[in-house]
Image (cartoon, rainbow, N blue to C red):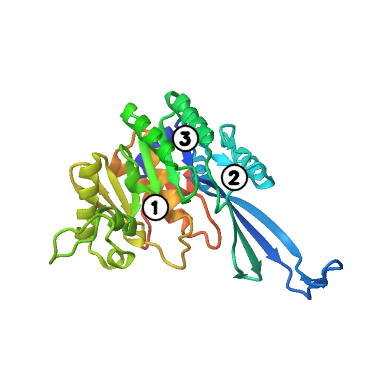
Amino acid sequence: MTPARAAEILGRIRSARIGIVGDFCLDAYWHIDRGTPELSIETGKPTRGVRAQQYNPGGAGNVAANCRAIGAGAVRAFGVIGPDLFGREMAAILSARGIDAGRLIVQEHDWATPVYAKPYIGAEEQERIDFGRWNMLAEGTGDALAGSVRESLPGLDAVIVNQQLERGFASRAVIQALNHLAASFPRLPFILDSRSMSGSFSGMILKLNAAEAFRLAGAVDESRPAQAAGSGTAEDASTASSETIGARARSIGRRTGKPVFVTRGADGILLFDGDQVEELGAVKLDGPIDTVGAGDTTVAAIACSLAAGASFREAGEMGNLAAAVTVRKLRETGTASPEEILEMSRPRRDA
């Protein structure tokens, strides 16, 4: 992609309106004091002090943050939070980043805002503490969520569906409702990024990594016919050739009738656009990288680009450029600005 075309797409993204339906989580970082623990007066047990704490949007929240950072004119969050301090913090953080959090639904019972709390002593992460593992989506909450998305679709240019949790927003009823909406609005791009439920959704453009593609389509090698869907393993995917992964993308795309983007880290993206498989090479980078959150950046860039009228190939190329920006931001779940993406699109002297 030329810098001129990248600049044109980024300019059009400024008027794009993106909706994110998904599991909105918080990443909590608690920096524990390394000094001698104090003893609790009440219990006599040692206590640890937290010197600093920070909270960042995770899951669908990080996708929303990436859409806003890329420059989308409007970003709207559709999800569920709990009646707790983490839910209030989630809404405040999203709002501070220019994301419309007014459609987040508070479920009063049987729901804790999902939080991944990461205590650190120095640079070493300790045992993580998770909130929200036992959430139960109420039928009324699911109905309200689906209804809110339905009412908002005429004002959106693309929708990202981001499933992270086994017990999150994606109940059977909500999935069915979203599938119906995707079928009812065929010209509106629905882009699915699902950790474990890709096979339950329909009518949506898929963004998968290679392991997810293998699990969805089934593993095959040169000496065997295709196996049953879901039989692939991460090990199969990590050693598979581009031709094998491309065959899986084609199989999935022909079954769903929608394009498929398969991300492969340093090897870029394999795209099945409904007709053929293309390899979209990643930006070559030197030095250390941090891939945490790169998938969120990629799906955000793809969705924003499609909303701005880019082709599927161009959307994939923008995904590669944006991911190349964020993986160079070490020890943080970074985002990519239009200026950073444009700079990455320019020919590099060491290329």
Label 3 or label 1, whichever lies nearer to me, is 1
Q: Label 3, label 2: how many angstroms apart (C-alpha)?
A: 23 Å
Position of residue 9 relative to residue 23, above or below, is above
N-terminal of the pair, mark 1 or mark 2, is 2
Amino acid on which disc 3 is placed: Gly
Position of residue 140 relative to residue 58, above or below, is above
Q: Secondary structure at mark 3?
A: strand
Q: Which residue is mark 1?
A: 196
Q: Which residue is mark 2?
A: 111
Q: Which residue is mark 3?
A: 19
Tell me: 35 left or right of 73.
right
Q: Which residue does the image show at 64% across and 59% down from the upper left?
A: 29
Q: Please state the total of marks drawn on the protein image.
A: 3
Give coordinates of residue 325: x percent, y percent.
46, 54
Q: Which residue does the image show at 62% across and 41% down from the upper left?
A: 109
Q: Which residue does the image show at 23% across and 39% down from the upper left?
A: 257
Q: Of 282 and 98, which appears nearest the observer? A: 98
N-terminal of the pair, mark 3 or mark 1, is 3
Q: Label 3, label 1: how many angstroms apart (C-alpha)?
A: 21 Å
Amino acid on which disc 2 is placed: Trp
